[in-house]
Each structure stands twice: as structure tokens, then as C-alpha cells.
Image: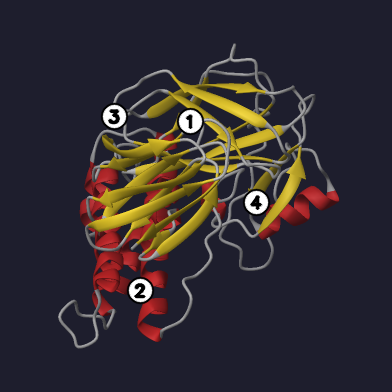
Amino acid sequence: MGGGLRRWWPWRGRDESALTEIEAEITAFGEALDVHSFSPGQPGATDEMRAELVRALDAYDQAKREVAGDRGRADILDVLRTLDEGRHALACLDALIAGQPLPERMPLCFFDARHGRAAWHVSWAPPGGAARTIAVCAADAVRLTENPSPSTPRQPGPGSRVRTQPREARPRPTTPTPVSQPQVSGKGGSGEQIHRLKMPSYRPAVMVFSTNGQTRVHLRFEGRKGRSSRLYRLSADGTPITARIPLPEASKAIAFRVFADGDREEWTAITAPLREVPRFHDEITGTGSDVVHYRGDPGPGVLYYAGPSLIQLEALNDRLAYWVTVTEGRAGEHTFQWPGRGYYQVRSAGAWSLSAT
């Protein structure tokens, strides 16, 4: 496999060291898949175990496809994110086999995905910019403690595989730019600025929109493709917002505007795989808008809502695109029929509960 990658890699001559690293990463992950002891037909195998194996195999195939085409230097980060998705799937499979809780997952390092998985959440601000909470690797967390300047080069420890920032590299821009980012942050919002969130290599995905404090937010997506409406009301009923929103579009980036009460509350938007969507069979509770994965059978269900304005329960298809509105109403109890297993979107501004009866 290494020889094939070496023939097809489009920027081999420009960055041989990066080629060597990514070859090693893909090869190591392929070997881990080859030697894994799990078999889909073995006694005790469950649908959830088989789904994690499929997710790992899909990530491996996707990584190979991403290095075979005419891609640019920056797309190496997409390959690393794809491999990270596959490794997490294998870790989840191992946990399911052992009967242990699924491993907690942190995103890749905010400063550079090549640093690996983040280990800490820290407060950081670019020169002249507002402070925000970001997830960074352990080495960057130490670096920021010693020197908060974002342009400080990393000093690798003994045996470190991470490369330092080149001396000739230019500082990161501190002014807003229309370039799509894997994570978007801000403070308040009047709807004037269009934010662009880069879609990950894995599909489908969800956006996780969160705030540091209590507020009310409206998100308006620039495209309505795959949605029942492009406007989302977000509120967490007295607590900070954490909302999952489906991303059904197949485009490379999602464009949206933020309308917030006031201009002081910080917010963050980041993409996440379907593994982050909560699953349930019998009952689940939540506050505000969310995406849930119903694992039960078709049949009667009950939606209880204790918030203001309307609540809507929408069924989504396998691509997370809007399919049909299952039920909607104001505060109180609403009975309905579950169409069956799948992903559902709750659109609300208050506390709710869903159950199968």
C-alpha cells in the first residue's frame, strides 16, 4: 500500500516528510484492522458492535481515497481527521466487547490536527481578539501556560513526533475571514456576519452549538436544502446552550448567521460525528433543540413539553435531511406514533421529554 500512495501522492516532492508520516498513519491503522479479533458473525456480536466496525472500515477506505486524488497540502488535515474517526470507532468496539463504557472523545487539537487529540480545554485569545475556550493537545496547553502568544513555536520533548512551527511561517490572521474553519467561535451576534463552518470528511454530521452563559440565540442557515426551515431558535431554559443541529448538506461548508441577545456571551460551533448523538430505547429528556437517535420499534409515543412557544419533533432520513414532522404543539403532553428507528430532531426553546409507550 505504501508504494501505491507514493506513486499517487500529488505533492510528494514538496513535502516528503509529510508523505512519510501519513503513509505510516494509514498503514498502521490498516494493520490494526487486519489483526483485530472481532468477527461480525461471532457469538455475542451485536448490531452496535458491527456498526462500529463498519465505521472503522469506512474511515480507512475514506482515508485511502483522500490521498489518491488531486488534493492540496492543507487536505492532509482531512486525512488525519478521518483516521481519528476510525480509531475512535475501534476504541468504541473494544469497549462494547469488554462491556465497558464508551470512551469519551475530545476533538483534535485546535491549533493543528497533526498534534493529535486534544487533552485540555483552555482560554485563549488571538492578538487583539476576544478570549474563547478551545480544546488543545497537552503540549500546546503547556506552551500557552508558559507563553500565551499564539505565534510561539512548539518545543517537542524527547521522542516527540510533532514538528515545530517553521521559522518563516507567517502569524495567524486576526481579522475575520470568509475561509471555512473546522471550528467557528464568536461573541454575541447581530446577524450581519456570515460564518462558514467546514464540513468534515465523514458524512453525515451534526453541528454542536454551545454558549458559555445563559442567552437566547437564533441561527439562520443560508441554505434550506434538506431542512424544514433554515431558522433555528436555541435556548437552554436558564443554563448555557448546548444544541446539536443536523447538517444534511453535501457541500464543503455550512454558512450561517448568529442572532443573539446581547453581545457579551461567547459561543462556539463545531462539527461532530453521529457518535455524539444520544441514543435511547424507552425515554430521553433534554432542554432546547437537539438531535436524538431512537432505537425502539414503531408504535405509540409521548412528547411532554414545558417550555415557551412551539415544540416540533421531526423525523430525519439517513442523510439527516428533513423527512416529516411527527408531532408539534405547545406546553403539555402530546401523543404520537413513532415511525421507527432512526434520527429525530427536536426543535424547542425549553425542557422536554420523549418516551415510547
User: Depth-wise, is mark 3 or mark 2 nearer the camera?
Assistant: 3
Number of the front mark, 3 or 4 = 3
Cα–Cα gap, marks 3 and 1: 17 Å
Q: Secondary structure at mark 3?
A: loop
Viewed as shown, does residue 204 lie left or right of 287? Answer: left
Q: Which mark is residue 136?
A: 4
| Residue 226: numbered disc | 3
Q: Which residue is mark 2?
A: 93
User: The residue under label 2 is which amino acid type?
Assistant: Leu
Q: How many marks?
A: 4
Q: Nearer the viewer, mark 2 or mark 4?
A: 2
- Counting other residues with Cα less than 10 Å from the Cα at mark 4, is it few (<14), some (14-19), or many (20 or more)? many
Could you classify mark 1 by the number of other residues whose Cα lies within 10 Å: few (under 14), some (14-19), or many (20 or more)? Answer: many
Q: Earlier in the sequence, mark 3 or mark 4?
A: 4
Residue type pointed to by label 3: Gly
Q: CA–CA distance between discs 3 and 4?
A: 33 Å
Q: CA distance from mark 4 to mark 1?
A: 19 Å
Which one is in front, 228 or 33? 228
State the residue position of label 1: 197
Considering only order in the chain, which callout, 1 or 3, is on the residue closer to the N terminus?
A: 1
**Residue 132 placement: quadrant:** top right
**Amino acid type of the residue that numbered disc 1 sits on in the rendered structure:** Leu
